[in-house]
Amino acid sequence: MVKPGIVIACGGLGKRMGGSKPLRMLGGATLLRHACDWATAWSDQVALAVRHDSQLLDQEFPLLIDRHTGIGPISALASAFDFALATKRAYVLVIGCDQPFLPNDLVARLSAAIGDRGAAMPTSLGREQPLATLWRADRGALTEYLGKGGQSLRGFAHRVNVVTVEWETEPSCDPFFNVNDPVALEEAERRFRRTRR
């Protein structure tokens, strides 16, 4: 199994949530705390990708400030590649701060699948999950993609010959459930209570 760094993407505006998504509470802890706890179980190199240095979400981990603005979550990937190379990791897993139910076999299954590909991406319920993808840290390929106007994580993944890995699941227990708005947060709270009984 490869030993990736893990970067938690925290720089989104969170408009549907009303702002400050990483600091929303779920089961007595912030969404960010859930993401950090999951990440530290699977890597000893964890960092937070943020928009600016005043977004001091959790000083326990390095903050990676977006060098590219206005291009969405692919800016977190650029920061993640820099982090991987600085910490001498050939691979980096980028996850969202709003995915509190990520599977414990995510790193193992993606590591087993990536081979010589540039990325290994989970799919569930017929949807690709670019914000839970294991990447080979290829800064040159990403710089070229961004230089040609590319801004899509999914598009870049396919550019680097991504392999997909299917998680069989039901909608009520999708491990890649995103907490994007208050309704989703309420659903996550119900699910959190069910799983902790």
Image (cartoon, rainbow, N blue to C red):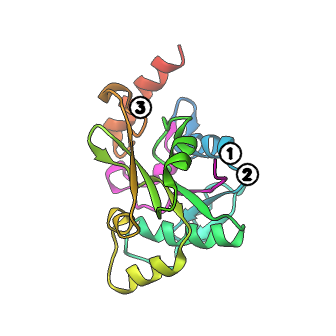
Relative to the observer, which residue lies in front, 143 or 70?
143
Q: Mark 2 to mark 3: distance in Å?
A: 27 Å
Q: Mark 1 to mark 3: distance in Å?
A: 21 Å
Q: Mark 1 to mark 2: distance in Å?
A: 6 Å
Please tell me which of labels 1 and 3 falls first in the chain.
1
- Label 1 sits on a secondary structure element that is helix
Farthest residue in the left direction? 126
Q: Residues within 10 Å of mark 3 (few under 14, many from 20)?
A: many
**Dot 1 amino acid type:** Thr
The residue labelled by disc 1 is 40
On the image, the x and y values in percent for residue 196 come to: 54, 19
Please tell me which of labels 2 and 3 falls first in the chain.
2
On the image, the x and y values in percent for residue 128 come to: 33, 49
**Eye-nearest disc, 1 or 3:** 1
187 lies above or below 122: above
Relative to the observer, which residue lies in front, 36 or 92?
92
The residue labelled by disc 2 is 44
- Magenta segment: 1-25
Please tell me the numbered disc located at residue 188: 3
- Label 3 sits on a secondary structure element that is helix
109 in magenta: no
**Eye-nearest disc, 2 or 3:** 2
